[in-house]
Amino acid sequence: MNEDLSATIRTGVTVVLVAALVSTVLSLMVVAQTILTAGQGTLQSGVDRVSLQQYEVYNGGSQSGTDVKAAVSLYSSQDIAILIHTTAMTSADQYYNYNSLLEGATQSQIPAGGVNVPVYTINKPTQTAGNSWVNGELWTQSGIVQFNGETKVLNTKGCTAYVLDSARFNSQLIKDKNNLIVGIIFTQRK
């Protein structure tokens, strides 16, 4: 009988120790998850800042024609619209729209190198007072952002869309209604 009581006590102590060990492990897992969640939020915030920093050079900056062409190339695989106004254009508010298209862009043809090349033009988006950026929305059809990859005109001398490498451009960002950067505007200085 003493042996039965002793075995029962050992079993009871073992169950209590296992329960304490399991509760300690679960508590450590909850603490670890809280720490990881906080770290993930901090990491995401840092990634967002770095992501936005790539556009900072265009926020009210001054760019060369080479920089403008590089931006068209650099953002060609992203949902970023590039609007360019050259001094050869007749309308001061008209811009050529490259890469992702903004709502309101219309297709036309311009002569470039002896052939007519399709281009998209758009009037300059509006700027809200007090903001350094202009407002614009990407043009989507069935959830897909519309795209213009025709950049031949940028390098065709004599074309109104020609961008001289040494030309100087003022730049501005384009943001949508959710305050996300959706494009960059380049306006050639006179």
Image (cartoon, rainbow, N blue to C red):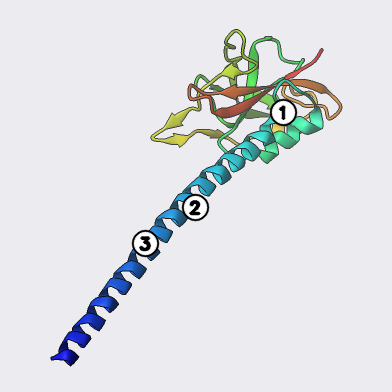
* Mark 3 in CB contact with mark 1 (< 8 angstroms): no
**Which residue carries the number 2 mark?**
36
For label 1, count other residues whose C-alpha is less than 10 Å away and answer few (under 14), some (14-19) or many (20+). Answer: many
- For label 3, the residue is 26
Q: Tag 2 or tag 1, which sits nearer the N-term?
A: 2
Q: Position of residue 151 (x, y in %)?
A: 68, 34
Residue 43 in view of the camera: yes
Quarter where residue 147 is shown: top right
Amino acid type for the residue under numbered disc 2: Leu
| Number of the front mark, 1 or 2 | 2
At 52% from the left and 23% from the top, the residue drawn is 176
Q: Is residue 151 visible?
A: no
Residue under the point 50% across and 33% down = 146
Measured Cα–Cα span from mark 1 to mark 2: 56 Å
**Screen quadrant of the N terminus:** bottom left
Circle 2 — which element?
Answer: helix
Q: Label 1 sits on what residue type?
A: Ala
Count residues near mark 3 (Cα–Cα under 10 Å), then give few for <14, some for 14-19, many for 20+: few
Disc 3 is placed on an element classified as: helix
* Between 188 and 120, the one nearer to me in the picture: 188
CA–CA distance in space, label 3 to label 1:
70 Å
Residue 73 shown left or right of residue 125 in the figure: right
**Could you tell which of marks 3 and 2 lies nearer the N-terminus?**
3
Separation (CA) of disc 3 from disc 2: 15 Å
Residue 112: give its label.
1
| Relative horizontal placement of residue 138, taking residue 119 as reference (left or right) | left
Residue at x 53% of width, y 24% of height: 179
Whether pointer 3 and pointer 2 mark residues with C-beta atoms closer than 8 Å, the reply is no
| Earlier sequence position, callout 3 versus callout 1 | 3
* CB-based contact (under 8 Å), mark 1 and mark 2: no
Q: Is residue 143 above or below residue 160?
A: below
* Residue at position x 69%, y 39% in the image: 73
